[in-house]
Image (tube, rainbow, N blue to C red):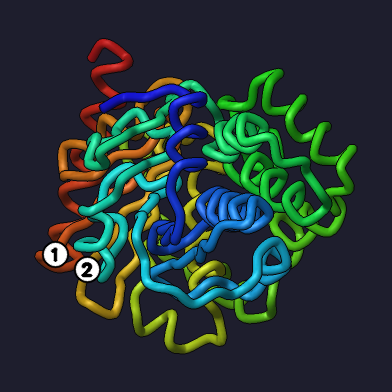
Amino acid sequence: MKIDVRQAAEFLKLNDDFLILMHASPDGDTLGCGYALCGTLQRMGKRAKAVCPDEIPKKFEYLFAAAEEQEFETKTVVCVDVADTKLLGDMKEVGDTAELCIDHHETNTDYAKRTLVRAEYAAACELMYEVINALGVPFDKELANCVYTGTATDTGCFKFSNTTPQTHLIAAEMMKFGADYAMINYVNFDLKTQGRIKLEQEALKTIRYFEGGRVAIITVTQSLINSVDVDSDDVGALANIPRQIEGVDVGICIKEKKSGEFKASLRTSQLVNAAEVCARFGGGGHARAGGCSFFNGLQNAEDEIIKAACEAVRKALGK
């Protein structure tokens, strides 16, 4: 059932003992939403905990300050920035029982009993900002850090085409409430570990071009990941590299996971809708960023996603 912000706030006011689920391979938006909502509910005197199926990168540890650790028996499951329960990994079955989903993906599958989605919003944290205001909880520095993190990271530090005037206004509000924007921008967009630099060096050696240079792909295998000291966030950051190359409309990064899954991450220009390409393989995302998975080996993953990307480019060019 689709609901609005007021209805979502009413539901949160009437319930308690919340388990807030954030998606696997966590980014700043799902984590910002999760800890912002968790902290808000705790400030209302409720019990809440935010849980992620994967390890949270160290650079996001500052978000933990927004909420306390609490132990209780879960009564209400809420998912944030989760378009499909497949994105919850080992916690998919728990996600299937969700009473509420707060999200901004156009590919949301409406799996929750109540779904609050604003696909036109650059970040789910923009929607969380509205929910927190509807709950009547005043922002403090810790909550502001959470919401600022989501808006900044899902817009590439406000550089991506999904950035809107509303995005900037919400970020400005968070700055007024004390968000440590300089630290957040540094750790998310400038800081790189030595392992990350090594990983980028090796990944760049795998780059290949197709469709006259309009499609570029890099591949990151488990053997490469194991050869350097990196965490999941270092690996995830590689997805942006191919699209940064002049003339590239579809940038692809294929990452091998320990399970044998090959995750393809797409970043595109306005010429191609990334979510539409990924939907062909059971994935999704946004117009400029999407992802999907393959399970039949690296060669199959590369062949399938390259073929789809090239077809999308040719279609867009009328060829």
Determine the residue positioned at 49% across, 68% down.
235
Residue at image location 65% in from the left, 39% down from the top: 151
User: Amino acid under label 1?
Assistant: Phe
Q: Secondary structure at mark 2?
A: loop
Q: Are marks 1 and 2 in contact (CB under 8 Å)?
A: yes
Residue 244's spot in the image, x, y percent?
57, 43
Where is residue 292? Give x, y as percent.
26, 50
Q: Amino acid at mark 2?
A: Glu
* Occupied quadrant, residue 251: top left
Residue found at the far left of this picture: 296
At which x and y percent is residue 38? 57, 57
Q: Is residue 32 visible?
A: yes
Q: Quadrant of residue 278?
A: top left
Q: Residue shown at 23%/15% (left/top)?
A: 319
Other residues around mark 1 within 10 Å, as few (<14) / some (14–19) / many (≥20): few
- The image shows residue 215, relative to residue 36, as above or below, that is above
**Residue hosting label 1:** 295
Q: Which mark is residue 144?
A: none
Q: Is residue 35 above or below residue 121?
A: below
Residue hosting label 2: 261
Q: Is residue 208 visible?
A: no
Q: Residues within 10 Å of mark 2 (few under 14, many from 20)?
A: some
Spot occupied by residue 210 in the image (x, y as percentages of width and height): 32, 41
Judged left or right of residue 301, residue 186 is right
Nearer to me, 296 or 152: 152
Relative side of 176 to 142, left or right: right
The quadrant of the picture occupied by the N terminus is: top left
Location of residue 63 (image quadrant): bottom right
Q: CA distance from mark 1 to mark 2?
A: 5 Å
Instruction: Mark 1 or mark 2: name the one nearer the start of the chain.
Output: 2
Horizontal side of 17 relative to 275 (left or right) equals right
